[in-house]
Image (cartoon, helix red, strand yellow):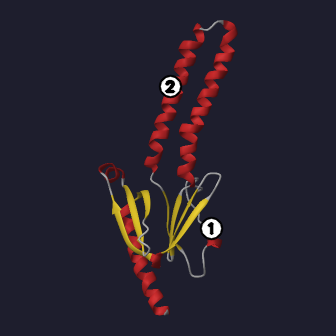
Amino acid sequence: MWDPFRMAFSEKLLGDGEHVVLDLRTHWKALIWPAVAFVLLCAAAGVVIGVALPAVPPGGKTVLGWVVAAVAAILLVWLCIIPFLRWYTTTYTVTNRRLITRRGILNKSGHDLPLVRINNVEYQKSLLDRMLGCGTLTLTTAAEDPLTLHDIPDVEHVHLQLGELMTDADATRREDT
């Protein structure tokens, strides 16, 4: 069955012998405020149209209706659609060799971090994160330049997987030298 939220990292972007281990998107909690904004925006537009529109003289009803619709549309894009698209286009892919981050709606940006360059992986979970099953993952490289990934679903599992993959990548690197 087709899943519109499934992330499919293209196989053509992987090297020989490289395979996807984890394909992640930030936790759905990033969509809570856009959903609340959507409900409030719909309610406010309904109240304005239901209460203010009947009080307006007949000639101004059309103009006020269009103004309310235009303001609601602009707020809908700004408060609901853009945050959803940011969430949808931000992905984290872990392969057996590297961590790949991709983000961007119109302008795309990405970062590839080889697992052998990661020195330390740690995670933090606030009380809300613990209730929702997500957390923040911080990766430290040899350059002491941490990469922080916020709202990672099932962060403890991702932490464990990265630790195992880093060990395997280091063992493979030592065998090759």
Query: Which residue is painted at 44% across and 73% down in the image?
Result: 143
In this image, 125 relative to 100: left or right? left
Q: Residue 85, relative to residue 66: is it above or below?
A: below
- Looking at this view, is 69 or 112 the one in front? 112
Q: Residue 81, relative to residue 119: is it above or below?
A: above
Q: Are there few (<14), some (14-19), or many (20+) residues within 10 Å of tag 2?
A: few
For marks 1 and 2, give the CA distance. Answer: 41 Å
Query: Which residue is painted at 29% across and 50% down in the image?
Result: 127
Res 109 quadrant in image:
bottom right
* Amino acid marked by disc 1: Ser
Res 14 quadrant in image:
bottom right
In this image, 103 relative to 149: left or right? right
Look at the image and tell me in which quarter the N terminus lies.
Answer: bottom right
Q: Position of residue 148 (x, y in %)?
A: 43, 61
Q: Residue furthest left?
A: 127
Q: Which type of secondary structure does the marked residue at label 1 adopt?
A: loop
> Number of labelled discs?
2
Residue pointed to by mark 1 = 10
Q: Position of residue 141 (x, y in %)?
A: 43, 73
Q: Position of residue 32 (x, y in %)?
A: 45, 42
In this image, 84 relative to 123: left or right? right
Instruction: Work out whether mark 1 precedes mark 2 in sequence or the reverse, and give the earlier one.
Output: 1
Find residue 43 and name its label: 2
Q: Position of residue 147 (x, y in %)?
A: 45, 64
- Looking at this view, is 149 or 5 the one in front? 149
Q: Are there few (<14), some (14-19), or many (20+) residues within 10 Å of tag 1?
A: few
In this image, 80 relative to 137: left or right? right
